[in-house]
């Protein structure tokens, strides 16, 4: 039981002193940086204890999705189901089952979640991806537990060139580091460009992305039978995610789950771009 302590005490005094000095220097450096450039909230200019955090106001404004929720859609339920009855499934999921098995989200799409998503997507705030991913890894722990791979929702090449990066891939890579799950960006591609989904109703959204995604022939053998998790920033009507899930299922995926940062709940959240 005491061997680790004995091993440490056996280290040369100078080596231990040098390690302590380096740690002290790093701590001092962090304090100097924080004094000169104090960390601020990820969404507003309010002071926080450390970088990558939300201030108290934004934290209270985030509509976190906690249990009980629908096991299929990941949407909040008004009551807890009897565990003996199995996973709780909402009437919406029963009436219109999604193409994926299960979806999980950190929060309902509200003002704070929207600001975070837009900061990443449109303001090139790649610094918010790791903290968002940490929340996603916690929210999706049950579907990540036995996942074989994460697959980000792909952008068409032209849109990727214009935007310079895929926010879904940034989130997937950060979630992968948190959950120790590999990311496979080559397993799903956008076969054709689509018009923006903003302003389209549910039917038009589904028509817009129908057949827009494909699994390359070179990836099919590796994908076959795998349990994969689609990663995106926001889930609205589910049209894009459903189109992706259908393409993966047709190509032989064993199971397709979904993990997003935010999702629209009961029509809340307004327009999403």
Image (tube, rainbow, N blue to C red):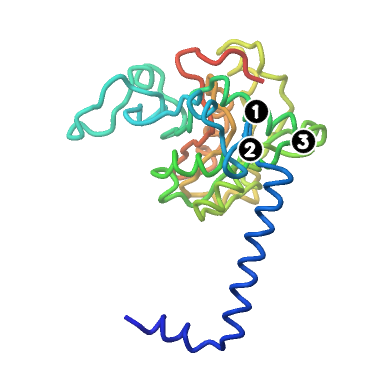
Measured Cα–Cα span from mark 2 to mark 1? 23 Å
Measured Cα–Cα span from mark 3 to mark 1? 27 Å
Residue 86 lies in quadrant: top left
Residue visible at 45% across and 34% down in the picture: 104
Does the rendering let one see residue 75? yes
Label 3 residue SS: helix
- Disc 3 vs disc 1: which is toward the camera? 1
Measured Cα–Cα span from mark 3 to mark 2? 11 Å
**Mark 1 neighbour class, 10 Å CA radius: few under 14, some 14 to 19, many 20 or more:** some
Is the C-beta separation of discs 2 and 1 under 8 Å?
Answer: no
Label 1 residue SS: loop
Residue visible at 62% across and 30% down in the picture: 116
The residue that disc 2 covers is: 168
The picture places residue 112, in percent across and down from the top left corner, at 57, 24
The residue that disc 1 covers is: 44
Label 2 residue SS: helix
Q: Is residue 118 above or below residue 250?
A: above
**Mark 2 neighbour class, 10 Å CA radius: few under 14, some 14 to 19, many 20 or more:** many
The picture places residue 141, in percent across and down from the top left corner, at 42, 44
The picture places residue 63, in percent across and down from the top left corner, at 46, 24
Residue 1 lies in quadrant: bottom left
Q: As drawn, is 116 to the left or to the right of 224?
A: right
The residue that disc 3 covers is: 160
Does the rendering let one see residue 225? no
Nearer to us in this view, 237 or 140: 140
Nearer to us in this view, 62 or 247: 62
Residue visible at 51% across and 49% down in the picture: 224
Given the current orientation, which residue lies at the most extreme left position?
Answer: 84
């Amino acid at each position: 039981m005491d061997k680790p302590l004995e091993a440490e005490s056996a280290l040369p005094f100078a080596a231990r002193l040098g390690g302590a000095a380096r740690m002290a220097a790093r701590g001092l450096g962090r304090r100097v940086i924080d004094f000169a450039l104090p960390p601020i909230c990820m969404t507003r200019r309010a002071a926080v204890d450390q970088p990558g955090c939300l201030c108290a106001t934004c934290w209270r404004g985030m509509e976190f999705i906690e249990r009980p929720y629908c096991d299929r859609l990941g949407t909040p339920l008004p009551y807890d189901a009897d565990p003996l009855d199995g996973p709780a499934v909402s009437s919406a999921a029963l009436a219109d089952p999604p193409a994926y098995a299960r979806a999980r989200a950190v929060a309902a799409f509200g003002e704070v979640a929207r600001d975070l998503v837009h900061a990443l997507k449109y303001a090139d705030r790649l610094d918010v991806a790791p903290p968002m991913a940490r929340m996603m890894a916690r929210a999706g722990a049950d579907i990540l537990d036995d996942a074989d791979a994460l697959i980000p929702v792909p952008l068409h090449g032209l849109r990727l060139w214009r935007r310079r990066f895929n926010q879904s891939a940034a989130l997937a890579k950060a979630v992968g580091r948190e959950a120790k799950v590999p990311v496979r960006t080559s397993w799903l591609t956008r076969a054709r460009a689509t018009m923006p989904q903003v302003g389209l109703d549910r039917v038009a959204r589904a028509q817009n992305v129908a057949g827009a995604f494909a699994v390359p022939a070179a990836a099919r053998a590796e994908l076959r039978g795998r349990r994969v998790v689609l990663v995106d920033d926001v889930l609205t009507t589910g049209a894009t995610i459903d189109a992706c899930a259908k393409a993966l299922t047709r190509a032989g995926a064993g199971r397709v789950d979904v993990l997003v940062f935010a999702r629209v709940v009961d029509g809340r959240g307004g327009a999403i771009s």
